[in-house]
Image: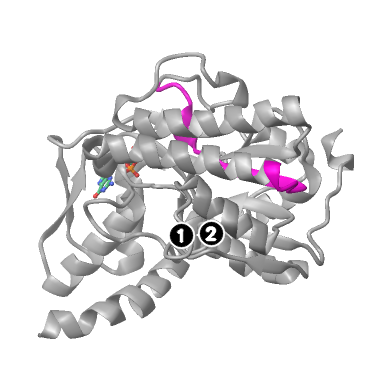
Amino acid sequence: MHNSTSYTLRNKRVWVAGHRGLVGSALVRRLQDEGCEILSASRAQVDLRAPEQLERWMRERKPEAVFVAAARVGGIYANDSRPAEFIYDNLMIAANVVEAACRHGVEKLLMLGSSCIYPRLAPQPISEDALLSGPLEPTNQWYAIAKIAGIKLCQAYRRQHGSDFISVMPTNLYGPGDNFDLMSSHVMPALMAKAHDAKLRRAPSLEVWGTGRPLREFMYVDDLADGLVFLMRHYSDEPIINIGTGIDLPIGELAAMVCEVVGFRGRLRFDTSKPDGTPRKVMDVSRLRELGWQARTPLRQGLEQTYRWYVEHIVREQRPAAVA
Ligand code: GDP
């Protein structure tokens, strides 16, 4: 079995590409326990889309292990309205980082994908074998195609150059460090920001996009970081691996739970002029369970922790502007 494989991060130079993002910042928190040196490159230092900038940085910093958590990401509206950025940036990041990692002899690389790489109507829960078995969801196909290229890059370099590059497909994520901007965020932070605002304004209702019926799975980002470190240490093979909770719920129920956590008591209003996207998206996580890992944080607890972070970091920072 794969879990006989063991790679240690101890005393290694570990680069978290995308260290300021939701996933990257959780990885930086988690890696504090691994006894490794954490490397990061700010956007001002290295544009990951530019091969010559990345080349120089790799020569200087010599990472031994790489987590590729850098990506242009966004929710359903951002994906649908800025398709060129979503395909170009993500293709360039994936191709550049994989090529540079191979050229500089990186021992192990973990590429982050996404559950949206799977066909829109994939059988649920979605198993890894569903990859490329049908048409994609049109709203995020640009991002999905770039992420599929990322998987294929890892597989191709493994075959041709023997590189120990693996790809992991996380479900929808949420947690501290998320993007709470209503026009570019995913559903959970959007609902949290709207519920908080509605509570302060004593609004009678809160707007939820779509019908509220699509089913989604949500994973707390610190659980993800723990699972990624587990896979970095114990998985070394060509097939992709899903990571999620295996539990989904309707968006309407998520909205109600977020309102409870935030303390907003008004009604939900469904705006059906906004898209629903994929009708259901829940991961089959049996492969990861067999390897010996599973998520720990219940949704309600994760939402409470995220709301505390939101109030401390986002609301506090915004306050002076709101008063002015
Ligand atoms: P998806 O999982 O790729 O579809 O991305 P999202 O997280 O953006 O959206 C998930 C679902 O939540 C979709 O059905 C959206 O229509 C719905 N949704 C409801 N309210 C909102 C909102 O305020 N923002 C976003 N982004 N999605 C919302």
Front-lying residue, 49 or 139: 49
Q: Is residue 117 magenta?
A: yes
The residue that mark 1 highlights is: 21
Ligand number 1: quarter of image:
top left
Q: Residue 244: x percent and y percent?
A: 57, 43
Q: Is residue 213 left or right of residue 144?
A: left
Residue 149 against residue 31 in the figure, above or below: above
Task: Check the image and name the residue furthest to the top.
Answer: 134
Q: Which mark is residue 220?
A: none
Q: Is residue 39 left or right of residue 198?
A: right
Q: Residue 116: x percent and y percent?
A: 44, 33
The residue that mark 2 highlights is: 24
Give the amino acid type for the residue marked by disc 2 in the picture: Gly
Give the amino acid type for the residue marked by disc 1 in the picture: Gly
Q: Is residue 279 magenta?
A: no
Indicate the quadrant where residue 15 lies. bottom right
Residue at image position (61%, 40%) is: 98
Evaluate if marks 1 and 2 touch, with contact meaning CB atoms under 8 Å apart.
yes
